[in-house]
Image: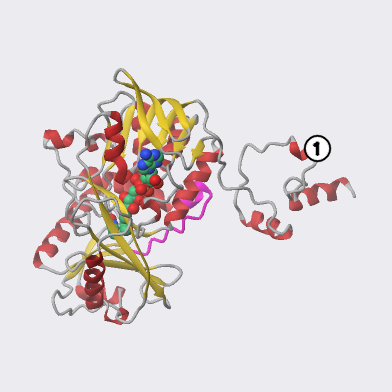
Amino acid sequence: MSQVSRVVTHWIVGNEQDRGIPNAYSKNRIRNHMRRYSAFAIAREGARYHTGWERAWKSPAPKKRYDAIIVGAGGHGLATAYYLGKNHGIKNVAILEKGWLGGGNTGRNTTIIRSNYLQDPSAAIYEKARSLYETMSQDLNYNVMFSPRGVMMLAQTEHEIRGYERTAHANALQGVATEFISPQRVKELVPIINIHGPRYPVLGALWQPRGGTARHDAVAWGYARACSDMGMDIIQQCEVTGVRRDGNKVIGVDTTNGTIDCDKLGVVVAGHSGVLADMAGFRLPIESVALQALVSEPIKPCMDVVVMANTVHGYMSQSDKGEMVIGGGADGYNNYTQRGSFHHIEETVRALVETFPMISRLKMLRQWGGIVDMTGDRSPIISRTPVENMFINCGWGTGGFKAIPGSGWAMAELMAKGASPLADEFTMWRFGEGKFIDESVAAGVAH
Ligand code: FAD
Ligand code: PYC
């Protein structure tokens, strides 16, 4: 074989190790960086029977010490770790997850992405997140299937018209592109909708054309792969059971895999935030409740925007597989079940059959719940804590999927530099100071 054909063969087919055939040379060969996903990689793997794909992230044993530990491998925890490495060069990081990564709310949500909030601090962080979603697949070299198909929130009472018109004006000043549209325009965009509903006719809608959806698991997997590629350790099946302190300063955590030391600790555990705060000796103004969703059998494409009907309470989009993805309300009492109360299913389906009569004979395939972390003003907490070098990111409640990249960006900056313009207003002390960021209407899900 000529030198040229050897090089070309190696390039296309890979060496023995790549094909799963160990030899003396390949055993010693350690790849530090993941191969990029590309059209060429697909062709190369096709040529060698897909034997060369690497695992998307490594699963190492924990080290004794890290510069930073993140508790919780949901979207927010993984994004925090990613931006710690990418934006601040902090790569000696472990992400500890008690279950499997993305198995919390990140893998249980209905994937709506929008930034049509009312208050300035909210618009800033949600719009930052939405804009980062636009380039996330390229940034992470992982297809997160961002689909800016447009999100509309129906106005079905006079009060909602006034509220959404006000939000559209506020968004114009904040640089967020939304508009209030007529019932006729709603019907043009969503031919299957009934705008003359018996209880609440559609009177208009707040429309964000660049809102949409993304594939939730892929967001978690893409960040995990990029973190692992930077040399960070993702440790699954590793529950944090205690926060270790020296005086008032955090020095590490106790876990089901032993004690691990760290200089800085970021707690990003959504519905379990109160439990972690309790371990560190402080309380949070958070309630944990179940929020649920369900999906139908797959049908042919019939709706290519996301519709939220907050008065009758139900929202719906169609997944790439054809399933109608439906979200219900939050339970009216605190709990840690990942299921949700049965009466919400009936109420949600009733609301959606009224709004979209053609779905009345659809079969529902799956129903599940997630434990969401609710604050009193329905805005998140991205904050220092009473414990030195311990930071907390929580309170995203029913609406944090859309915020993942912006939240991770802000939390990483806070942990690295001690302050972040995007996070400044979201401290845990705002509740004591009466500086609420009231988004109880924009949060969009009845609770
Ligand atoms: P999670 O993804 O829950 O991650 C936290 C992780 O911490 C979990 O994996 C958990 O196992 C881990 N953990 C907890 N305790 C410990 C411990 N002691 N040690 C180690 N690990 C621990 N948002 C939107 O923007 N749009 C939507 O359409 C939308 N729909 C939703 C629908 C439903 C049914 C639900 C439940 C939520 C919805 N949300 C939506 C909200 C969104 O899902 C959440 O705000 C977001 O996913 C929170 O991400 P996270 O990373 O903070 O939390
Ligand atoms: O925040 O847009 C949202 C949302 C929709 C469903 C649950 N949360």
In the figure, residue 165 lies in which quadrant? bottom left
On screen, residue 213 versus residue 395, left or right, reads right
Mark 1 vs ligand 1: CB under 8 Å?
no
Mostly what secondary structure, the magenta segment? loop
Residue 106, position as x, y percentages in the image: 38, 52
Residue 326, position as x, y percentages in the image: 32, 67
What amino acid is found at the position of numbered circle 1 in the picture?
Answer: Ala
Give the vertical position of 208 relative to 185 (above or below). above
The number of discs equals 1
144 falls in the magenta region: yes
| Residue at the limit of the structure toward the right, as seen here | 1
Q: Which residues are magenta?
A: 136-150
**Residue displayed at 77% across by 44% down:** 22
Give the vertical position of 305 relative to 115 (above or below). below
> Is residue 396 visible in this depiction of the protein?
yes
| Residue at the limit of the structure toward the left, as seen here | 158
Q: Residues within 10 Å of mark 1 (few under 14, many from 20)?
A: few
On screen, residue 146 versus residue 7, left or right, reads left
In the figure, residue 49 lies in which quadrant? bottom right
**Residue displayed at 66% across by 38% down:** 31
On screen, residue 51 versus residue 284, left or right, reads right
**Residue displayed at 22% across by 42% down:** 286
440 falls in the magenta region: no
Task: Work out whether residue 90 or residue 162 is closer to the camera in this orientation and state it.
Answer: 90
In the figure, residue 367 lies in which quadrant? bottom left
Residue 75, position as x, y percentages in the image: 40, 47
Q: Which residue is mark 1?
A: 24
Residue 439, position as x, y percentages in the image: 18, 50
Q: Where ligand 2 lies, by quadrant?
A: bottom left
> Is residue 75 visible in this depiction of the protein?
no
